[in-house]
Image (cartoon, rainbow, N blue to C red):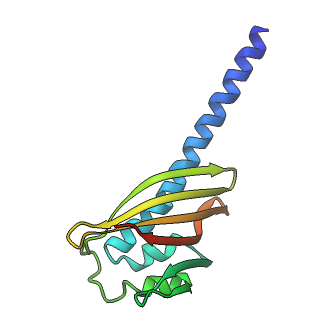
C-alpha cells in the first residue's frame, strides 16, 4: 500500500510540474504579444500568433471585424519601435488542457483611461505555443 501511495504522489507531482511548465510556456507567448504591442516590436508581436490565427475585434468605427495577425500587427506599424506606447498589460488567467490553452489579459492605458480585456485561445504545435484566436472588449 505504501508503494502505491508513493507512486501516486510521484505521479501527481510530475503532472503538477508539467502543468506549471506548460503555463510558463503559454505565458512566454503572451509576453511576446504584450511586449510586442506595447513597444512596437512587430516581429515579436507577430511571433505570438499562428499564421492562420483569427482575431475578432471591434474597429474604431464600432463595427465587428475579423483580422489576420498581419493586419493586427499593422496597427502598430507607425509607432516608434522600442518606445513604450502606454499599453500596460498583465496576464490575469491561464488554463492549460494538454495542447490547448485559454488566457485572459488586461490591457490598459492609464493616461488615456481605457481598459480592455483580451481573451485568447492558444494551441501547442511543434513544441511551441501560438495564439490561434483573440477577441477583446473595452470595459472602462
The image quarter in which residue 14 lies: top right
Instruction: Report the side of 108 relative to 70 (left or right).
Output: left
Number of numbered discs on residues: 0
Q: Quick one: 58 or 13, which is closer to the camera?
A: 58
Name the residue at 67% across, 29% down: 12
Q: Position of residue 51 (x, y in %)?
A: 61, 79
Q: Position of residue 4 (x, y in %)?
A: 78, 16
The image quarter in which residue 32 lies: bottom left
Name the residue at 42% across, 90% down: 61
Q: Residue furthest left?
A: 111
The image quarter in which residue 84 lies: bottom left
Name the residue at 67% across, 22% down: 9
Considering only vertical position in the picture, is 82 above or below 65?
A: above
Instruction: Report the side of 7 relative to 41 (left or right).
Output: right
Q: Residue furthest top?
A: 2
Location of the N terminus (image quadrant) = top right
Q: Position of residue 10 (x, y in %)?
A: 67, 24
Q: Position of residue 106 (x, y in %)?
A: 40, 61
Instruction: Report the side of 123 relative to 59 (left or right).
Output: right
Location of the C terminus (image quadrant) = bottom left
Amino acid at each position: 500500500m505504501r508503494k502505491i501511495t508513493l507512486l501516486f504522489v510521484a505521479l501527481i507531482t510530475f503532472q503538477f510540474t508539467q502543468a506549471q511548465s506548460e503555463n510558463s510556456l503559454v505565458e512566454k507567448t503572451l509576453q511576446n504579444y504584450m511586449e510586442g504591442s506595447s513597444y512596437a516590436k512587430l516581429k515579436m508581436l507577430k511571433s505570438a500568433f499562428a499564421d492562420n490565427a483569427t482575431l475578432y475585434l471591434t474597429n474604431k468605427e464600432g463595427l465587428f471585424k475579423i483580422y489576420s495577425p498581419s493586419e493586427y500587427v499593422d496597427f502598430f506599424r507607425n509607432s516608434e519601435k522600442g518606445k513604450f506606447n502606454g499599453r500596460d498589460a498583465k496576464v490575469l488567467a491561464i488554463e492549460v488542457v494538454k495542447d490547448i490553452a485559454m488566457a485572459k489579459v488586461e490591457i490598459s492605458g492609464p493616461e488615456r483611461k481605457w481598459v480592455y480585456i483580451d481573451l485568447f485561445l492558444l494551441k501547442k504545435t511543434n513544441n511551441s505555443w501560438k495564439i490561434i484566436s483573440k477577441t477583446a472588449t473595452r470595459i472602462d
